[in-house]
Image (cartoon, coloured by chain):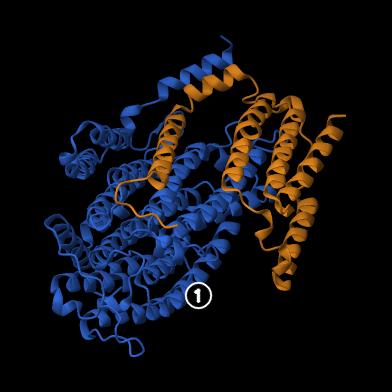
Chain colours: A blue, B orange
Amino acid sequence: MTPELVKVAAAASDNTWAAIFPELMLACVALLLLVAEIVLPKKFHELIPSIAIAGIVGTFIGLLINFQSAWLGAYTFSGLLHHTMGGQIMRAFFLLAALLVCLLGRVSLAKQAMPRIEFFHLVLIITAAMMLLAQSAHFVMLFVALETVTIGFYILVSYFRTSAASLEAGLKYLVMGALSSGMLLFGIVLLYGIAGNPALKAHTAESMNFGSLAIFLAANPHQFLASIGIVLVLAGVAFKIGAFPFQIWIPDVYQGAPTPVTAFLAVASKAAGFAVLLALAGKDGVFASYGWLVTPVLTVLAAATILFGNVAALTQHNVKRLIGLSGVSHAGFLLLGVIAASSPLAAMATGAVYFYLFAYLFASFAVFGVMTHLAGADDSDQDLDHYTGLAKESPFLAAILAIGLGSLAGIPPLAGFMGKLFVFIAAFQAGARWLLVIAVAGVVISIYYYFGWIKAAFFETWTSPVDSPNTPARPARTPVELAAGIALVALALGSLALGFYPGTFGQLLALR
Amino acid sequence: MAQLLFNLFAVFTLVTAAGVVLNKNVVNAAMCLLLTLVGVAGLFVALNAYLLAFILLLVYAGAVVALFLFIIMLLDTKGDQRPGLKHLSLIARAIALALVAGGVVSFFVRSRLPEPSLGATPALGAELKLYAYQLFTTYLLPVQVIGFLLLIAMLGVIVLSKKFDGLEDIK
């Protein structure tokens, strides 16, 4: 054996599989689903989604018990993964999102003649990949995990293939996703190439590794090619979170995708983008020494994203497009938090971003849960008019909807308000005053369309359009089953509890 | 000599890549893509990365482009239905041209690097044995994740294209 081979072989001993036990669990449950579909007789197939849900719940409980994991702060897999408290929080976040997607998926798939099991399998694999993504400390790991997530989403978005809208959404997502992956990859390659150049200071053979790359960037603070690489990487990530001007795919994809998948995209995929962004642009991140470049770029992105998302959402009548565009504005608010997190002045900024993500998860899934129950056979056709009279017919769903939308709008006793408050305080500490003015203006605009939705549900009654009086009424509302009902109540209570008493949870997130 | 070869392959790659974009006939575009990949493989050879060049030819030029051709023939597409580039608005063209020109100029003005000596550059992955060892030790986790990626890709093909009972596909 040559000395190089000996060194490489020694790396195998660093592959600590126990450190990624939750991801392994999810992958095994995902495979188990496929096996169960072959082995079990047809009449037991109804039970298979429950296996997925039980698997996620089990993994979640295991993660909570083991939250202070033995590997905290350590690098495993030869530096591919870095286990941090932030990583643990994001793991819990993705598991929670996956659980809710599976619950909504059961409701939504019941209205379609689609195969069921594959949906849950894909959700599990995507979740595991996102969990790895949030902990990756190496561009190879980051890219592989990100592509697994993205390819899973291509399939999930076009899952309702009998609907032209779903297929169109899948194709659009495929093209835009490939473009964004291309940009990200080009950026990574530029950084790899420049950091490996032996003519430069602090060059490294391990230039895909976040730690070595950060050292190289700190030693060469105004390298032109590295700047281009950084901007391209940021652009690739901005595609995933749907920041302006990379939000172009959002309305069509969100409308065409099955509602649970839209929820998964809006919450988990966006959160994954922000986990990556925090690892790259945070104050201990890879690009920390390029603050002169990263902060202005993100500031422009955030301002444009907040304004565009809110203004574009004003005119929407399809609720899926509306929530998609309002999600763009939430990405803008979160970017505000990331900008604060890149500054040494705002100590609580990273925690504020996590808090905002959780508040967004509770509120969004409450709204998406109601949407899933109101959707008809054509999943892409969900209009504001379908919500008329909801408060009379189903006070339960209307109440959940009001709490979810109120939290998204940032109305005081709810979690969304606290999330926005924390992010704004962090931004204030970091000195992003002008951006704060824009953000507050964005919040004011957003109240208009969120309350338009609440108004439709509470104060309007259904009337057929004047020009076509024979229009069939809105699709029948699905009765709420026990599991989905419990989940919706828990989400609403979560929004209320986090809003009234953010203390313990807020501390957990802020004190990392 | 090596520099000349590198430049030749670079120009060849660019020209054929333009051919992929501008060709109206899909089969010709795919053939141009094949030539582009051969050009890139040539670049890799000029950089002493023989393994990469070999993999690129084997996988992309050999398998992927052949697959493209299969699909083009299966779908029997007419190549001339694509809207030409002349429908682009004047402003969009001007902005795109300005961006490309600005990029090229700034690249030449600001990105001059001291010439590295080739001997000092580590030839990672040049040797097949070291490369394979790395895949199964250092990068074992990404390789495993890619296994799952391929699994869900296969699953996706089945879910999106197989005929199921009671499923009315759109025509």
The residue nearer to you, when weighing A322 against A189, is A322
Whether B166 is drawn above or below A132: the answer is: below
Q: Residues within 10 Å of mark 1 (few under 14, many from 20)?
A: few
- Under mark 1, the amino acid is Trp
The residue singled out by tag 1 in the image is A434
Q: Quadrant of residue A292?
A: bottom right
* Relative to A409, A172 lies left or right: right
* Relative to A466, A413 lies left or right: left
Q: Quadrant of residue B11?
A: top right
Q: Residue A72: where, in percent of width, then height?
A: 33, 37
Q: Is residue A313 visible?
A: yes
Q: Residue furthest bottom?
A: A466
The residue nearer to you, when weighing A36 against A12, is A36
Q: Residue A499: where, in percent of width, then height?
A: 23, 67
Whether B72 is drawn above or below A9: the answer is: below
Q: Residue B18: where, in percent of width, then height?
A: 75, 50
Pointer 1 indicates a residue of which chain? Answer: A
Q: Residue A44: where, in percent of width, then height?
A: 16, 40
